[in-house]
Image (cartoon, rainbow, N blue to C red):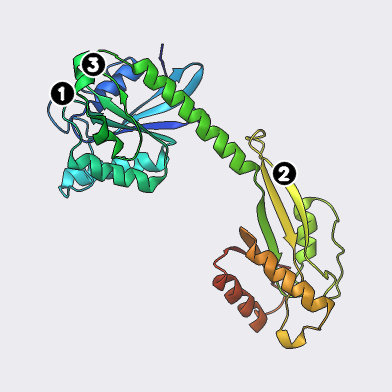
Amino acid sequence: MTTPATKLKEKIPTVAIIGRTNVGKSTLFNRLIESEQAIVSTEKGTTRTRNEEVVIWRGEKFKLVDTGGVDFGSDTKMEKKIKTQADKALTEADLIIFLTDGKEGILKQEKRIAKRLQQSEIPVILAANKIDNNSDTESLLVDEWYRLGFGKPIRVSALNGRNVGKLLDKIHAKLKQAQAYTKQRKQESVNVSIVGRPNAGKSTLFNELIGEEEVIVSGKSHTTREPYDTKVIYSTEETKTDKQIINFIDTVGIRKKKNVEAGIEKKGVDKSIEAIEQSNIVLFLIDGSRQISKQDKKLGNLLKDKLKSVIVLINK
């Protein structure tokens, strides 16, 4: 049995109901929350604003969002507003219920919506509504639904509650899968390299970030002879169970090519450039006690050419 609840402060997954007009989105929304919050009518476009409510199923909470009827090919002023609301729901959603009309079949609007959903990469549950009895089930042409690209539809009746429990079980399972995937991704380390010209303070920053003096710090240039990396497990006070592994990499100070000595220094610079290529984020450290040099600009251009996400830090 579903349990409506008030809006909660903790972060919970969001499930959005998407579909063209008059397929029964508001009826399904009301059925899932066991209320009549959304106005239900046979007139197209009754839902003009988003309705949302927190639902509890099998001890797990999720926020259910009912959007206006969507037609991503329409250009009317009202349809544009509804499309904006639907796009917002897509941006926020962890899971989509793509609701269709099991009696009318698949129309051009569904194909346009399907194309938009495939671009979003959000998990989708395809549902065919208005399947009120066995004769409706027999007349459902499943091939039409398969062509949308989301597999076999769940056959439901929002009006009489047919297979709504099955739909809720599917939502529960899909959200569990999505949460497990997110957790797995967070356990993968993010490579963060620290780059800059010699003596900009890279090793000092590295030690500060990892909380230990792993790297020798000296006022003399080229103390770091090769990239050095350390993994740190990071979590905030609010999300102690939501941990992220960050691999910080202290690189060799990169100076002008003509000044780079052959041997150890050149190998260190080459490895530093390789570390940059393998990094997800680059901390570009600039010595604020000096003017921006040509070498700083060259390093900036190198990072730009490598298409890296860069955070520029001014030290000293």
The vertical placement of 158 against 312, above or below, is above
Q: Which amino acid does label 3 sit on?
A: Leu
Q: Which of marks 3 and 1 is nearer the N terminus?
A: 1
Mark 3 lies on residue: 159
Query: Where in the figure is residue 290, as x and y percent of width and height?
Result: 71, 78
Mark 2 lies on residue: 233
- Which image quarter holds the N terminus? top left
Looking at the rendered image, the disc whose residue lies closer to the viewer, 3 or 2, is 3
SS label for mark 1? loop
Regarding residue 253, the answer to whether it shows in the image is: no
Mark 1 lies on residue: 41
Q: Which mark is residue 308?
A: none
Q: Earlier in the sequence, mark 3 or mark 2?
A: 3
Q: Which residue is drawn at 41% across and 34% down?
A: 95
Q: What residue type is labelled 1?
A: Ser
Query: Where in the figure is residue 72, as x and y percent of width and height?
Result: 23, 46
Please tell me which residue lies in front, 123 or 221: 123
In 3D space, how far apart are the residues under numbered discs 3 and 1 (Cα atoms)?
Answer: 12 Å
Q: Which residue is drawn at 61% across and 42% down?
A: 186
- Among the 4 quarters of the image, the one containing residue 149: top left
SS label for mark 2? strand
Q: What residue type is labelled 2?
A: Ile
Q: Earlier in the sequence, mark 2 or mark 1?
A: 1
Q: Residue at x 73, y 73 (%)?
A: 270
For residue 121, side relative to residue 189 (left or right): left
